[in-house]
Amino acid sequence: MNLRKSLKKRVAKVKYPLKTYRPEKKQRPENMIEVKSAWIGLELIIEDILDRFDINREKCIEFGTEFCYSTVVFSNFFDSVRGIDLFTGDVHSGQKADHYEDTSGSVAHFKNISLIQSDYRDYIKKDDEQYDFAHVDIIHSCKETYECGAWAVKHSKCCIFHDTESFPEVRRAVYDLAKDHGKTAYNYPYHKGLGIIV
Ligand SMILES: C[S@@+](CC[C@H](N)C(=O)[O-])C[C@H]1O[C@@H](n2cnc3c(N)ncnc32)[C@H](O)[C@@H]1O
């Protein structure tokens, strides 16, 4: 890692302090898929988060599914999981050819997952439902994470954000969202970092 990037991360930790999340138990969900993902490892603490904050297990929404690693993890815990993605990548996760059809096919046997190909900006204009749980893992800029996260925080009881450790802009968005919505923000500092707003 270059010096400038590592300095930015250290500054972000001081400027945007988040309570450290300490799981009491770690458990591997029964159903998993083998795809490339920076999310690997976080599946172990999802049940702990749901139990800690007394989250219902009905409806989950995710922005940024990519190849559905995290989507399938959530499908272990919720009656329905809705995943929104462009399915063409972004500057941080890498631009790709449209993989909506292939990815949909690869998770078709998980009957509680439904995937929607959309920009989050278009999607949030049309959906006013409430969810038990939300996950934001889109392009890792502060503006987009904050904008998508603001909708997710308003439409769910608990919202999690990936990459708080690897992207200072995501950490900043989590800090600002919790402050602006009168909520509490935690951070689990492993596997690139998971912000939790409740
Ligand atoms: C880091 S990946 C998600 C990783 C995934 N959660 C996992 O478990 O591996 C980010 C995804 O966000 C999607 N994305 C980026 N900007 C978006 C936008 N404006 N609207 C919807 N999806 C977006 C990209 O297409 C990409 O698939």
Image (tube, rainbow, N blue to C red):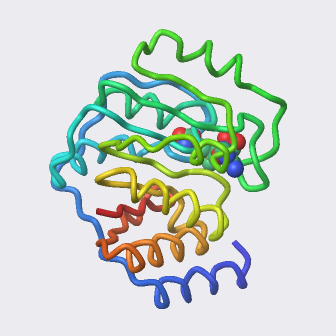
**What percent of the width, then of the height, locates residue 100?**
70, 24
For the C terminus, the quadrant is: bottom left
In terms of image quadrants, where is residue 72?
top left
**What percent of the width, then of the height, locates residue 4?**
72, 84
- Which residue is rendered at x = 30% and y = 34% of the image? 28
Q: Residue 144 or 27: which is nearer the viewer?
A: 144
Residue 112 as seen in the image, left or right of residue 90: left
- Which residue is rendered at x = 39% and y = 58% of the image? 154
Residue 162 as seen in the image, left or right of residue 66: left
**Residue 19 vertical placement versus 30 (above, below):** below
Q: Quadrant of ligand 1?
A: top right
Label total for image: 0
Determine the residue located farthest toward the top in the rendered image.
Answer: 109
**Residue 104 vertical placement versus 136 (above, below):** above
**What percent of the width, then of the height, locates residue 173?**
53, 72
- Which residue is rendered at x = 67% and y = 31% of the image? 117
In terms of image quadrants, where is residue 52?
bottom left
For the N terminus, the quadrant is: bottom right
**What percent of the width, then of the height, locates residue 155?**
39, 51
Q: Residue 25 or 100: which is nearer the viewer?
A: 100
- Which residue is rendered at x = 34% and y = 71% of the image? 185
